[in-house]
Image (cartoon, helix red, strand yellow):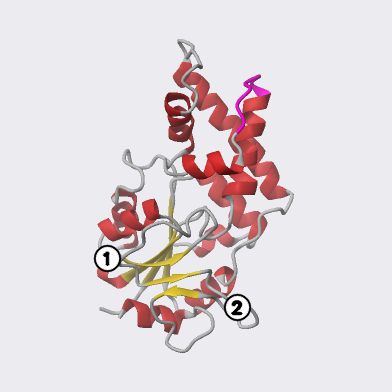
Amino acid sequence: MTLTSILFDVDGTLADTERDGHRIAFNKAFEAFGLDWNWDVELYGRLLAVTGGKERIRHYVDHWNKAYVKPSDFDDLVSQLHREKTKYYAEILEAGNIPMRPGISRLLKEAMARDMKLAIVTTTTPGNVTTLLKCSLDPDAANWFDVIAAGDIVPAKKPAPDIYFWAIERLGVQPQACIAVEDSENGFQASRGAGIKTVITVTDYTKDQNFSGAAAILSDLGEPETPFNVLQGSSYGKRYADIDLFERWHA
């Protein structure tokens, strides 16, 4: 089946947002609420095994900060912390501190020029997605995508495939006509569970995770002047990922 659609994860895939974006914003939110919690780089890497910001906070309290006594309104506190964190994350984005990863802007423009369908498939909130796209890609970049699947639109988050099924249903395509770009094992399990071939662009947090069965594993999508490193699979002689190469991986 012909490749018609490319679906992108956001955090770690479109941009390396986790260590110096989301992590910093969480810590600012904790401080604003008078909590002595601090997620350092190593701990945050471990917490990334849990998808979803609110879920990550609950997991931290249950598994890493068991001495903390939950108040009766703990669920409300988690929601408030997450809203505060989202505010700080937006400030980081608006300061221009989170650039797109190599090759993202170029590939998106090439896909649009070929009238391909594009989608965002992420567990981060819709507001985080649109702010990142506006501040780090293009003021109109949210309109580049036919579907933005984000946040709590499905109950089961990655590694469950539900959000991918939601996205391809609204794209009006079959999974065999798609390819996904992910950076994490949780994301890969979700896309693979939906029957979608997947290209992985690793980060420092995810480079040692299990991506067995991926179409290719890369350092990033690369640029003509700064080629990617191919960690698994074939680049078919190319130095950076373009639509022709995505079609080879898809085939």
The local secondary structure at tag 2 comes to loop
Prevailing secondary structure of the magenta residues: loop
Q: Quadrant of the N terminus?
A: bottom left
Depth check, mark 1 against mark 2: the one in front is: 2
The one nearer the camera, 202 or 175, is 202
* 24 relative to 216, above or below: above
Which residue is most to the top? 72
Residue in view at x 57 percent, y 72 percent: 103
Residue in view at x 56 percent, y 43 percent: 42
Residue in view at x 31 percent, y 52 percent: 166
Identify which amino acid the numbered label 1 is placed on: Pro
Residue 232 found in image quarter? bottom left
The one nearer the camera, 40 or 224, is 40
Residue 136 visible to the viewer: yes
* 13 relative to 28, above or below: below
Give the residue pinned by disc 1: 175
Query: Dot 2: within a 10 Å radius of its alpha carbon, few (fewer than 14), some, or many (20 or more) residues?
Result: some
Q: Point out the tag, 1 or 2, that comes first from the N-terminus.
A: 1
36 within the magenta span: yes
Report the span colored magenta.
Answer: 32-38
Give the residue pinned by disc 2: 223
